[in-house]
């Protein structure tokens, strides 16, 4: 599953790009047409699920007896996608009549080993939508040139094994490379759809493995802390990032008995305030909110002034701790209340685990 890499969002209109599935479809169509005509269409035009008809220039093309190969360089537009610039290659080989289309993972494309993903274990990590797109493209070529779409389609991504280390694939049990993804064929810049898709896939894999406890963490420090705290397996650890809402809404409809939300004080203060997107550009810590919680501890107004004037959530927490105010515990309880509201009665027992920047526990609620 691809993951958006950290990047500063550019200013001005953002350029859309193409998914690995769209690029694989274009490469496969060009190669299959070369089997019929001896020539590669360049550029090659495909039809996307919503009717768009983009054209792709070929990066490479070659063919031999009964096979042809073409490749496309993926352009993710202005999205910080880790597969931007990757070469997506398709080698197409003729099969006996009636064989249909068979998919194969070439170098740099992963193979599924765990249940719970859209394709079963043992299959190439080529998702259903790209498979449909490739099948329709090959059927179009076969109809145009009087043949049948009986072919083996091998998708490869040179260097895909290294790219996959920057995605969720190793944790999801996808070995050997990246996945070929995309439901629409189009990458919308900064939509974060790939990240949220990976969260959903992580939940699906955990459920298929029969796990009764998963944890969503805002970053590496909190993930390491929650792993130590509960002894959870890697497939139980969900890199939630800023997308608390994406995690909670999906697990509401696809329950796991126990859920832990783990993160730093600042991020989880936003969740306590009711924010479901914890990114700094889309939500911020409210000092008045923190002062209101501190007031619940009986703090005098004079002690609240430094919280109200604090530059950061960490500074506010430090002042509260020096004055004996259990602010982290109050934030954890309010964050848990937000999570329970989103879960809306789903059979999921949720707790919140707040850690400092070194991963030391600051506060933890119960699962009850």
Image: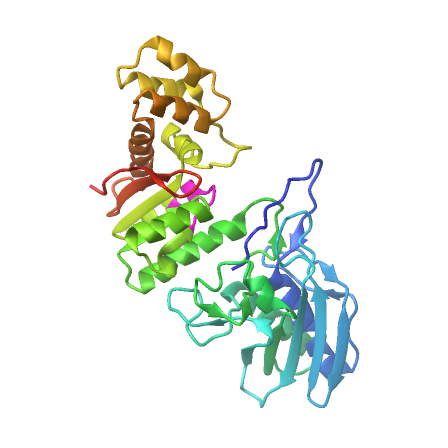
Is 233 left or right of 108, judged from the image as shown? left
Label tally: 0
In terms of image quadrants, where is residue 190? top right
- The magenta-colored residue range is 239-247
Q: Is residue 36 visible?
A: no
Instruction: Where is residue 48? Give x, y as percent.
Output: 62, 59
Instruction: Where is residue 189? Give x, y as percent.
Output: 63, 46
Is 195 left or right of 294, judged from the image as shown? right
Q: Residue furthest left?
A: 368
Relative to the observer, which residue lies in front, 100 or 102? Answer: 102
The residue at the point 57 percent across, 45 percent down is: 191
Relative to the observer, which residue lies in front, 143 or 266? Answer: 266
In terms of image quadrants, where is residue 11? top right
Instruction: Where is residue 174? Give x, y as percent.
Output: 47, 68
Is 98 left or right of 47, judged from the image as shown? left
The residue at the point 53 percent across, 68 percent down is: 126
Say if 178 sits above or below 274 in the image: below
């Amino acid at each position: 599953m691809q993951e958006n890499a950290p990047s500063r969002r550019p200013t001005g209109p953002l350029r859309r790009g193409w998914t690995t599935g769209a690029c694989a479809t274009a490469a496969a169509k060009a190669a299959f047409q070369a089997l019929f005509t001896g020539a590669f269409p360049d550029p090659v035009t495909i039809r996307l699920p919503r009717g768009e008809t983009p054209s792709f220039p070929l990066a490479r093309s070659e063919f031999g007896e009964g096979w042809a190969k073409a490749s496309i360089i993926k352009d993710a537009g202005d999205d910080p996608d880790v597969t931007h610039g990757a070469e997506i290659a398709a080698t197409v080989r003729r099969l006996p009549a009636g064989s249909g289309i068979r998919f194969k993972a070439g170098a740099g494309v992963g193979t599924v080993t765990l249940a719970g993903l859209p394709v079963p274990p043992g299959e190439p990590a080529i998702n259903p939508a790209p498979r449909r797109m490739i099948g329709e493209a090959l059927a179009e070529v076969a109809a145009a040139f009087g043949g049948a779409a009986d072919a083996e389609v091998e998708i490869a991504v040179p260097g895909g094994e290294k790219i996959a280390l920057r995605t969720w694939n190793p944790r999801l049990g996808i070995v050997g490379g990246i996945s070929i993804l995309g439901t629409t064929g189009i990458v919308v810049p900064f939509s974060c759809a790939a990240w949220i898709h990976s969260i959903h896939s992580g939940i699906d894999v955990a459920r298929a493995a029969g796990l009764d406890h998963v944890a969503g963490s805002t970053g590496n420090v909190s993930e390491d802390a929650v792993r130590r705290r509960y002894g959870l397996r890697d497939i139980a650890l969900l890199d939630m990032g800023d997308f608390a809402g994406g995690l909670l809404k999906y697990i509401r409809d696809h329950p796991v008995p126990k859920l832990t939300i783990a993160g730093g004080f600042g991020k989880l203060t936003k969740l306590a305030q009711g924010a479901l997107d914890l990114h700094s550009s889309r939500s911020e810590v409210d000092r008045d909110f923190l002062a209101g919680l501190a007031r619940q501890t009986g703090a005098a107004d004079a002690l609240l002034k430094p919280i109200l004037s604090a530059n950061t959530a960490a500074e506010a927490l430090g002042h509260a701790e020096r004055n004996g105010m259990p602010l982290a515990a109050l934030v954890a309880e309010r964050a848990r209340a937000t999570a329970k509201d989103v879960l809306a009665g789903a059979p999921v027992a949720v707790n919140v685990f707040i850690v400092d920047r070194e991963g030391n526990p600051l506060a933890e609620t119960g699962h009850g």
